[in-house]
Image (cartoon, rainbow, N blue to C red):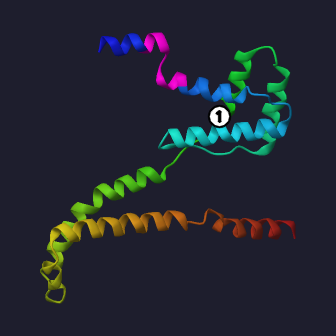
Amino acid sequence: MGAGVSMIQKVGSPTQLLTDQLFASMEKDIKNFDQFHIAFLEVLNKFNAAMPGVHYDVPARAEVKECYRKWNEEKDDEEKRKDLLTKLLEKSNIISKTDTALLLTGVAAPPVAMIGKRAAGNFPTLSFVKLVPDVLFVPSVTLLAVGCMKYARKNKLPEAAVPAKEQSSSADAQ
């Protein structure tokens, strides 16, 4: 335990090493906005690959352009440049709620499957459910529940309310 702590004190924490490496990749020969934008996208890809659960969404091009303008003005101060990039990363930080819903579905599905199997066994038309072993039934129902949850999340259309707003605004205009 003591060796690990002393190693972290000498080298730095793993998170600090990761961020230092990523920001070092931003310091390569960047001369225009397109190079900055590509380097920033590479940083987002590296963060998304390294950190499960927390995902960084690509900010609007205008936000990145504004950050580049400020970043370019601070050519001499590395700390301010790092702060600008950190603030842009914080703005684009998205914690996925799908993971929580899928986790709850995955945890709740096995007991519900067992209760459902026992309840279905009492009905004569569903008595065939007793023939399926628990080892096959519970994982199958769990996979089906998680698959349905993912499908429902994927096909959820948040834009469904947009036509109603457009209709009310067009009615106000008349």
Q: Is residue 86 left or right of residue 127?
A: right
Q: Is residue 122 left or right of residue 88?
A: left
- Say which residue label 1 marks: 89
Is residue 121 on the magenta stretch? Answer: no
* Residue 75, percent from left and from top: 82, 18
Amino acid on which the number 1 mark rests in the picture: Leu
Task: Give 25 or 37, whichever is nearer the viewer.
Answer: 25
Residue 7 position (above or below residue 131): above
Task: Please give the name of the residue rendered at 33% of the width and 12% of the height, measured from the top-left corner.
Answer: 3
Task: Please give the name of the residue rendered at 31% of the width and 11% of the height, measured from the top-left corner.
Answer: 2
Is residue 15 on the magenta stretch? Answer: yes
Q: Is residue 87 left or right of residue 132?
A: right
Residue 79 position (above or below residue 168): above
The answer to whether residue 138 is visible is: yes
* Residue 92, percent from left and from top: 64, 40
* Residue 170, percent from left and from top: 82, 69
Rendered image quadrant of residue 67:
top right
* Residue 74, percent from left and from top: 81, 19
Task: Give 42 or 152, whichever is nearer the viewer.
Answer: 42
Quadrant of the image for the N terminus?
Answer: top left
The magenta segment: 8-17
The answer to whether residue 92 is visible is: no
Rendered image quadrant of residue 28:
top right
Residue 70 position (above or below residue 173): above
Q: Residue furthest front?
A: 29
Magenta residues, dominant SS class: helix
Rendered image quadrant of residue 35:
top right
Task: Please give the name of the residue rendered at 76% of the width and 14% of the height, measured from the top-left corner.
Answer: 77
Where disc 1 sits, the SS reads: helix
